Image: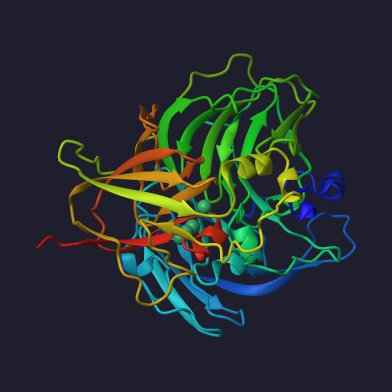
Amino acid sequence: MHSNFSISRRGLLQAGAGLAAMSVLPRQGRTAASGAPERKIAAMPAARRLSGKEKSETAFWTYDGQVPGPTLRLRQHEPVRFRVENGLSQDTTVHWHGIRLPNAMDGVPGLTQPPIKPGETFLYTFTPPDAGTFWYHPHANSLEQLGRGLAGALIVEEAEAVPVDRDLLWVLADWRIDEEGQIASGFGNMMEAGMSGRVGNTITLNGSVPGDQTVRAGERIRLRLLNSSLARIMALRFEGHAPLIVARDGQPCDPHEPDEGGLLLGPAMRVDLVIDMRGEPRGRYRVTDGFYRGLGYELTRFVYSEMPVLRKESPPPFRLPPNPLPEPDLTTAQRHELTLEGGMMSHSAADDMRSGMQGMQGMQGMQGMGRATWSINGHSMMGDGHAGMAPLFTLARGSSHIVAMRNRTAWWHPMHLHGFSFRVLTRNGSPVPHNQWADTVLLAPEDVVEIAFVADNPGDWMLHCHVTDHQMAGLMTVLRVAEAG
Ligand code: C2O
Ligand code: CU
Ligand code: CU
């Protein structure tokens, strides 16, 4: 069990390709009102090297042969058409995580569309209403499909260019690589499912074991972070720098510094940072992840080039232009409670897990604990999208709602709602500052978080934990938005 949780030093030391290549698609041609050009995306197996030095290639499941999948760059309010081809030997779908789109385009098999069978295609068409950092991934057999590499970033560009010198994307992913350099099998291990989920042993940044990130003194960068891991939570620190969070899950917020404990980034979460590169030419500054106590590691480094300082004074801070989000009316909002329960072990055992996983050795009592399950309000909806998922609540279209999520488990859960961005109102009774909206909110053990949104988008929408093992093992439900009466 131990090795499941230790970062591959070997991997990190073999830092291969320097600046991770951002795969950028040529901008789509202007779209006529008659419809956008159709772009193909193929889900298919492909082999790649995780670092330049590995002898063998690793077999992945990919979009278009790339890990991560091609970065899709869209323009706000411009329609797009994606023809997804299934070149896998099992059903798949694509979910456009965080995009507020019509329910039929949401990519949940059995709930919003039939699965795409091997050899078949599905045409997704939508018009992104919000600019920001989003992503796409399958919603069929998600644990294995995401865990084998099917994920990519989706960037919706602001109508007006944002005043930064460079716009960078780090797709962070965690893999469990076995001795042969292959993705370890054993997806859906029930013991893991009842604990932290499948945490891996190798971290990649844009598909490679991270090398140095070359920067220039005095430049201002926008850094888009996406954690596409199955289960790994990160707490990032940027030594010698003072990043400002300008958006969460694609939605602009009041610029603010990350918490003392580091920038928390759970699975599926995105954060856009603005960083003024105030280091010295030739300076080296570590970016570290210290989430799991005692298992901190250096994720990557900012390495300053010799180029002269671009500008001496940082330009004034800026905020991203707002997205057209409907503001929930808290005076009329209807209130709902979601209680998360289940998982294995006591709180103290879970604490041990976070303090270095030593607890794993002394896990008496693991036997006889039965099948790990999680539940929401006493119901365990298992697996991935499937037919017959009955909604837990029906919300009247156009009305405002407050959902209080109560984590009565010993584990962390990034809770995600499809189809909406929600305002994060309170955490443990305190108002959440900085006008934060999200589609995925991370709950620590015993946290109570209140979110609010307008139920403006009709259909059946999943709400689930994005630790994929947790979702599969019951931490999933469905909310329906329907016309009143
Ligand atoms: Cu990333 Cu159900 O979603
Ligand atoms: Cu989603
Ligand atoms: Cu969870």
Q: Residue at x 26, y 57 (%)?
A: 457
Which image quarter: residue 404? top left
Q: Position of residue 340 (x, y in %)?
A: 42, 51
The image's colour scheme reads rainbow
**Above or below, 377 relative to 386:** above
Whether residue 29 appears in this view of the structure is: no
Lateral position of residue 11 relative to residue 318, left or right: right
Q: Residue at x 39, y 35 (%)?
A: 436
Q: Quadrant of the N terminus?
A: bottom right
Q: Position of residue 18 (x, y in %)?
A: 79, 44
Question: Which sits in the foreground, 45 or 422?
Answer: 422
**Furthest-left residue in this view:** 485
Lateral position of residue 316 relative to residue 210, left or right: left
Q: Residue at x 80, y 61 (%)?
A: 49
Which image quarter: residue 89? bottom right
Q: Position of residue 202 (x, y in %)?
A: 75, 52
Lateral position of residue 37 relative to residue 231, left or right: left
**Above or below, 37 relative to 1:** below
